[in-house]
Amino acid sequence: MKLSLPRTPRQKIIFSTSLTLVLTGALLAFVTLPSIREIKSLNEQIYAQRSELEKLYQKGQLLKQTLKEYEEIKPTTAALERIYIKRGEELNFITTLEAIANTNHLNQEIKLGTQDPKKLTNQLPIQLEINGSLPQFIHYLASLEALDYYLNIDTLRLNSASRNRARPNDQGNPETNLTALLLAAAYFRP
C-alpha cells in the first residue's frame, strides 16, 4: 500500500495540521501526562514532609518549654527534698521534736504509729502528748510550723486544769496547765 502525498495546497494544509495534532497528542500522552502525575506525586510527598516537619517543630517547642519550666522550678526541688523525712533518719526528726519541746519548756511524749503493711503509704503517724502552759504551747506550735519538715496535724485536743496558787493573796490570773494531744503525720520521700 502506497501513501499518496498531498498534491494540492488544501491537502497539504490538512495533512500538516493533522500531523501536527497527532504529534501534539502523542507528546501529551507520552510526555506531559506522566510529568503531571509525577508533579502531583512530588507535591503530595512535599506536603507529607511538611506536615511531619511541623509536628517535629511542635515537639521541639514543647520540649524547649518543658526544659524552661524545669529550670524555673529546679531551685524549689531542694526545698521539697527537705520537707520529707528520709527513710532510716526518723531519729533526726524525733530529736528535732524533742529539741522544740525543750526550747519551749514543755514536757512531751512521742509515740510513733505503725504503718499498715497492706497500705503502701509514705506516711509516718505521730502522737504527741504535751504538758505546759498556754504561752509555751503556742510557741511550740509556732516552732512546729517553722520546721522544714511537712507535718500535718489531724487532731488537736486541749485539756486544762488550774494550778494551785503558790501565794493565796495573788490577785493575778492563775497560770493554766495544759495537756495537749496532737495526732499528726509526717511524710517520707516517695
Image (cartoon, rainbow, N blue to C red):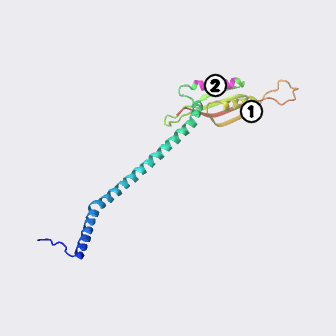
Circle 1 packing at 10 Å, graded few (<14), some (14-19), many (20+), is some
Secondary element under disc 1, as helix, strand or loop, is strand
Q: Earlier in the sequence, mark 2 or mark 1?
A: 2
Q: Left or right of 85: which side holds 26?
A: left
**In the foreground, 5 or 141:** 5
Q: Residue 145: where, in percent of width, then height?
A: 67, 32
Q: Left or right of 163: which side holds 143?
A: left
Q: CA distance from mark 2 to mark 1?
A: 26 Å
**Which quadrant holds residue 91?**
top right
State whether residue 20 is above or below residue 102.
below
Q: Main secondary structure of the magenta part?
A: helix
Q: Was residue 95 drawn as part of the magenta stretch in this picture?
A: yes
Eye-nearest disc, 2 or 1: 2
Q: Was residue 9 drawn as part of the magenta stretch in this picture?
A: no
**Which quadrant holds residue 92?**
top right
Which circle marks residue 96 in the picture?
2
Q: Residue placed at 24% from the left, 68% from the top?
A: 19
Determine which residue is flagged by label 1.
160
Identify the magenta region. Answer: 91-102
**In the foreground, 46 or 78:** 46
State whether residue 90 is above or below residue 43.
above
Circle 2 packing at 10 Å, graded few (<14), some (14-19), many (20+), is some
Q: Residue 41: where, in percent of width, then height?
A: 34, 56
Disc 2 + disc 1, Cβ < 8 Å = no
